[in-house]
Image (cartoon, helix red, strand yellow):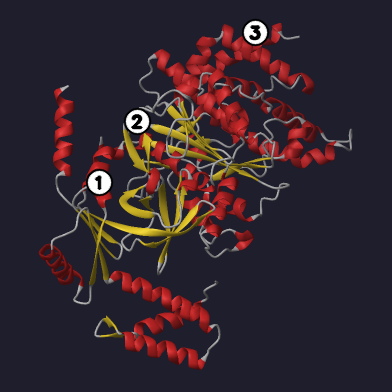
């Protein structure tokens, strides 16, 4: 009790320093979530400014006689003639372990009705990305649990991998699958007391989404037990453009706290197309000159500075990382539009989802030809490399030959074998949503495929074979799976064990 | 009113020409305005409006608004004016008003700088910090 009294005493003593100097301005114009203010001669760019009634703003335009500011909070409380004060602070959000399991808005206020957030500290929303000295190259994998991605388009911790595709092609689902996979791995490591495993914490930033979508995502994550490792930053379509513009930066700040404390974080920006649209609105209302598609000239910088904050820092700086999975929605598959090309060029690769594939039943609808990962293969575990090294090539050749397949019988044996293999790989990579596959199971299944155990199975029964094989391995051969997981590579002993396991399984398969 | 670059440049030039020895010169201002009206360049009304705005901001920088909870003694107001003139230059004009809402103390505003030594401000800060 006495400490509280002392605290108040010191605060009162601090207030005794008589007069305070401040810099003020007068609101001349307000509307559409922005205010133009006369005065404020000492204001700095991106500084928080204080309006009456507890409304805050951000000074974005410093002009000759005026300051253009965007309003955070209730813009209707700001009126012409109001006195505005500078604060000398940057916009900051609460960060820390206490953010996990919470749903917050752009400025970190809780939206889930679970009481105030227990944050350790505050981080500025805009922060310069780590420089070259602090960084190291990507070397640890993010196990997404999606077989097609882990095998062909691997993602490493600290990478920025774009998920791009038309509406309703499973972009968000892919992101949620990744979160669920991380949660399962984190939980498994916690239960096993594995000190070597680095848990990956997830931050899902929903920008311009429908509230119903965010509620659905939350429900899925709660049902799958992923929320204890996840923070949701929500700036739904009903939020102001200001909040939508700032939400990804707030999410990045929350992720950076994990990185600075030597831990790993994964941020999903869902989606950056709507983020660009919100920024366009803010810019146009602030009367900034517009460029292509009416986006302001600095929309590239907007996304590049955001995605540059994804990094893997070297061990001297704690060895933490922030991985970014931005999502872009294309219109009718047009990847050459302004924002998609920008973000493609910024990121370290993209996962391209195709509507046609989706309706053919290939789900996740990953287009193998157009998807790449520029740095992730350095982070793949050796076992996956051993079994999946040739898969991408096999599939690409299959797509090329698939056109000939329609001509039917007069194909040589080699082509036919390649087609059969391709069809089986496609089947193998089909996966139901919210069902990530552990990496050791992926290795075992792909080993079976590489070694011809799937060749006698008819294409339409490949999925059934795979499910049964997974069941068999998980129930009867969990020792083997654990060995693969621990050794992270297939040596002769393990291959022999895999072989005997598959021979045994083949006898039961009908 | 849409202000283009031409209007802005012309008004700024006029403002620059309105000073003698770093002080606003009313004679120069009126002669500038008269000559502009006589020449009538394109959109001269907009130029005048913008010039007026720049002038207003310039004058505000040289005007001190001193608010106090009760009427100040002539001695005190003289002291305040002198100190402000030392800081902001001799052409500063001080304007004294009484605002009982301050509860006590003085609040001075010069341009966009504010020194707030009022009781109201201290109470507000106390409220925020606690």
| A414 relative position to A243: left or right | right
Question: What residue is rendered at 49% in x and 40% in y?
Answer: A324
Circle nearer the viewer, 3 or 2: 2
Report the residue marked by disc 3: A504
Question: What residue is rendered at 56% in x and 55% in y?
Answer: A280
Inter-mark Cα distance, 2 to 1: 32 Å
In the image shown, does A110 or B68 lie closer to the viewer? B68
- Dot label at residue B120: 1
Report the residue marked by disc 2: A119
Circle nearer the viewer, 1 or 3: 1
Inter-mark Cα distance, 3 to 2: 53 Å
Q: Chain of mark 1?
A: B
Element type at marker 2? loop
**Residue B46: % across, % down:** 51, 78
* Label 2 and label 1 in one chain: no
Badge 2 local density, few (<14 within 10 Å), some, or many (20+)?
some
Circles 1 and 3, Cβ within 8 Å, touching? The answer is: no
**Residue A330: % across, % down:** 67, 46
| A40 relative position to A434: left or right | left
Q: Is residue A369 above or below residue A226?
A: below
Q: Chain of mark 2?
A: A
Circles 2 and 1, Cβ within 8 Å, touching? The answer is: no
* Label 1 and label 3 in one chain: no
Q: Is residue B31 above or below residue A418?
A: below
Question: What residue is rendered at 16% in x and 59% in y?
Answer: B72
| A48 relative position to A210: left or right | left
């Amino acid at each position: 009790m006495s400490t509280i009294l002392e605290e108040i005493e010191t605060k009162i003593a601090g207030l005794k320093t008589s007069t305070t100097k401040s810099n003020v301005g007068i609101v001349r114009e307000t509307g559409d979530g922005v205010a133009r203010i006369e005065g404020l001669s000492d204001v700095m760019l991106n500084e928080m400014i204080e309006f009456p009634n507890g409304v805050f703003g951000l000074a974005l335009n410093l002009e000759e006689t005026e300051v253009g500011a965007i309003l955070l909070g209730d813009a209707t409380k700001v009126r012409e003639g109001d006195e505005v004060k500078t604060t000398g602070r940057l916009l900051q959000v609460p960060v820390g372990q206490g953010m996990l399991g919470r749903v917050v808005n752009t400025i970190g206020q809780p939206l889930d009705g679970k009481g105030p957030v227990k944050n350790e500290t505050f981080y500025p929303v805009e922060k310069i990305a780590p420089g070259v000295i602090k960084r190291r190259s990507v070397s640890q994998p993010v196990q997404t649990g999606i077989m097609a991605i882990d095998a062909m388009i691997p993602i490493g911790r600290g990478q920025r991998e774009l998920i791009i595709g038309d509406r309703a092609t499973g972009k968000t689902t892919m992101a949620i699958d990744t979160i669920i996979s991380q949660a399962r791995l984190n939980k498994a490591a916690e239960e096993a007391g594995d000190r070597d495993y680095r848990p990956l914490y997830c931050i899902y930033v929903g920008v311009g989404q429908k509230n119903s979508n965010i509620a659905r995502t939350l429900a899925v994550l709660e049902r799958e037990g992923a929320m204890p490792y996840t923070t949701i930053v929500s700036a739904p379509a009903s939020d102001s453009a200001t909040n939508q513009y700032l939400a990804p930066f707030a999410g990045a700040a929350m992720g950076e706290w994990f990185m600075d404390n030597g831990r790993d974080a994964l941020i999903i920006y869902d989606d950056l197309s709507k983020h660009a649209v919100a920024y366009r609105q803010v810019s146009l209302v602030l009367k900034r000159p517009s460029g292509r598609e009416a986006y302001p000239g600095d929309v590239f910088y907007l996304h590049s500075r955001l995605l540059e904050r994804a990094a893997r820092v070297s061990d001297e700086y704690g060895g933490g990382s922030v991985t970014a999975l931005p999502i872009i929605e294309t219109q009718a598959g047009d990847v050459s539009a302004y924002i998609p090309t920008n973000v493609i060029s910024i990121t370290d690769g993209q996962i391209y989802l195709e509507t046609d594939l989706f309706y053919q039943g290939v789900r996740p609808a990953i287009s193998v030809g157009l998807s790449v990962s520029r740095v992730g293969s350095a982070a793949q575990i050796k076992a996956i490399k051993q079994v999946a090294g040739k898969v991408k090539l096999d599939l690409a050749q299959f797509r090329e030959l698939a056109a000939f397949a329609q001509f039917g019988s007069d194909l040589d044996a080699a082509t036919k074998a390649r087609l059969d293999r391709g069809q089986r790989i496609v089947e193998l990579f089909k996966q139901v949503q919210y069902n990530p596959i552990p990496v050791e199971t992926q290795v075992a299944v792909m080993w079976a495929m590489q070694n011809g155990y799937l060749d006698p199975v008819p294409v339409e029964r490949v999925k059934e074979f795979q499910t049964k094989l997974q069941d068999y391995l998980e129930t009867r051969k969990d020792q083997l799976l654990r060995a693969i997981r621990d050794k992270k590579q297939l040596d002769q002993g393990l291959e022999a064990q895999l072989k005997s396991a598959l021979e045994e399984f083949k006898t039961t398969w009908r | 009113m849409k202000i283009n670059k031409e209007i802005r440049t012309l008004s700024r030039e006029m403002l620059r020409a309105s000073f003698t020895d770093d002080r606003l010169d009313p004679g120069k201002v009126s002669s500038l305005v008269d000559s502009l009206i006589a020449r009538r360049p394109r959109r001269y009304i907009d130029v005048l409006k913008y010039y007026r705005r720049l002038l207003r901001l310039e004058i505000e920088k040289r005007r001190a608004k001193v608010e106090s909870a009760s009427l100040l003694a002539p001695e005190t107001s003289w002291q305040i004016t002198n100190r402000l003139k030392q800081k902001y230059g001799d052409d500063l004009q001080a304007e004294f008003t009484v605002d009982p809402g301050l509860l006590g103390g003085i609040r001075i505003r010069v341009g966009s700088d504010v020194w707030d030594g009022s009781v109201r401000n201290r109470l507000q800060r106390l409220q925020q910090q606690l």
